[in-house]
Amino acid sequence: MRAFTDARDEHTQNEFWIVEHPPVYTLGLGADQSHVLAAHDIPVVQTDRGGEVTYHGPGQVVIYLLIDLRRSHPKARLFAREFVNKIEQAVINTLAAYNLTGERKEGAPGIYVSDGQWQGAKVAALGLKVRGNGCTYHGVSLNVDMDLTPFSWINPCGYAGLATVDMKTLGVTVPLSQVQNALAQNLQDLLTAPDFSTSLHTMTTENTPVATAAYDPTEKQKGANKTARIPIKIVPMERLPKPDWIRVKAGSPTTRFYEIKDILRANKLVTVCEEASCPNIGECFGKGTATFMIMGDKCTRRCPFCDVGHGRPDPLDVDEPANLAKTIAALKLSYVVITSVDRDDLRDGGAAHFAECITRVRELSPMTRIEILTPDFRGRMDRALEILNMAPPDVMNHNLETAPRLYKEARPGSDYEYSLNLLKRFKEQHPNTPTKSGIMVGLGETDEEVLQVMRDMRAHNVDMLTIGQYLAPSGHHLPVRRYVHPDVFKMYEEEAYKMGFAHAAVGAMVRSSYHADQQAHGVGTDCEKLEDNEKV
């Protein structure tokens, strides 16, 4: 690595070296050797990276990052902190894809388990060296399926008694090669820019490179390109014939369909109606209604039921809150829904952008009621809720989407209990603001699982409920496993009111934001005087 870094020039391609080491302890430049309590015949190697002592061994992903920082920042040392942040975020995103939650700790580099039995245990380590020429080497390690005993023979990273853990201990058993590819891809997503060329190499301990496929993370991926890179295999199956009760109305030139689209494009705004291929787009656009999607059209996650594109998001548009507010004011809308893609690349998950949009809309349209449909702010809940306290919405919506048994298949990177807790904590802080959540049916859940999700919502003080039929956007998405009969939807609705929901919108074509104003009216958000052409 040193030789490669010393010899490189402005034309040398950036590289990732992906390694699985034999057992070895490595020491950073300033490491205290007393932190090696008992080596037990494991080699101890001095390195020139930062940090203290750590252990590498079989079952651990190690990726060395040979990067020229000058290609993405004119002053490399000023970029180093952001560089470290992106590496840590890549680990967090990789863990999230397997339904595990990782977090940073102030003053303690690496990634730690943020909840559950192993909360506070270290699962990934980070050690880097930035040379005077602005080039980096060394890198990051992630524990996948290891013998963890050697960690007990040292003070990991200089911390006596620090617990270490691997993904297998956390309940995830996957091939090492799969996690190698996943972490490398997440690193490339976060670190690659148009002028930041990077190649990936998988290397054995004999240093034999094997090139892996690369792609352009700046492009929006949909369909097969999106779902091909998740740890869930989509098995094509024969499509179920749609029953008679599944009917969609398309927009026509005689409605406001194209007028609304023109207004949105003119103001550089995006709707989830278009991006998620909502079946109600014809009806809603035809009536002059829409759900605005902020923070771009590239999601950092790859949920295989969703048709929103995946990719490395563009920087936030600082003019978007103002443009959104102007559009809402110009259309004289009295009820709006604002949603977003997942933005795991942002330290607050996008909460500040939500708050800014709410503030700007209220400045120009003080009588407009605002519902937000948020992501889960995974790993950033405390910060996100604190920010939303400054500009709370009139309705707080976050969708559970499906039963917890199906989360690893349908929502890789999300956690059922975490989402429930987000709704509960918001309600505790804003007891007079309605909370809302929704699920899809047809992914393979049972009726009893649907009812249990509804009970869980009520146990977490959720006021409003939506349930609709899942419709696969393409053959590359999760298949529809059943079409729920209207009589079953009627049963869900009846049970919802028995459980105490203030409003339940239940039916085959219901979506979370479908007739949202009418749903809000059911819990008293002062929508009584709205006219049909004033609702969004």
Image (tube, rainbow, N blue to C red):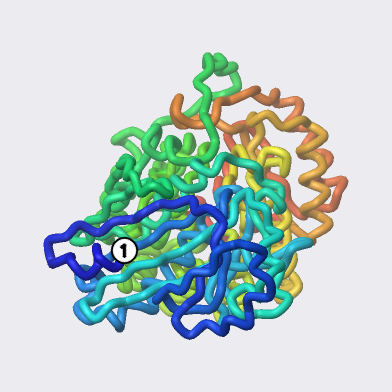
x, y (%) of residue 472? 51, 30
Instruction: Give the residue displayed 31% in from the left and 36% down from the top.
Output: 254
Report if residue 294 is visible in the image: yes
Closer to the camera in the image, 168 or 308: 168
User: Which amino acid type is marked by label 1?
Assistant: Met
Q: Is residue 299 above or below residue 484?
A: below
Closer to the camera in the image, 456 or 48: 48
Quarter the N terminus occupies: bottom left
Instruction: Give the residue displayed 79% in from the left and 60% down from the top.
Output: 460
Give the residue at mark 1: 1
Q: Quadrant of residue 265?
A: bottom left
Q: Quadrant of residue 312?
A: bottom left
* Image-based side of 238 in relation to 428, left or right: left
Instruction: Give the residue displayed 56% in from the left and 39% down from the top.
Output: 175
* Image-based side of 400 in relation to 270, left or right: right
x, y (%) of residue 277? 43, 38
What is the number of callouts on the image? 1
Closer to the camera in the image, 121 or 530: 121
SS label for mark 1: loop
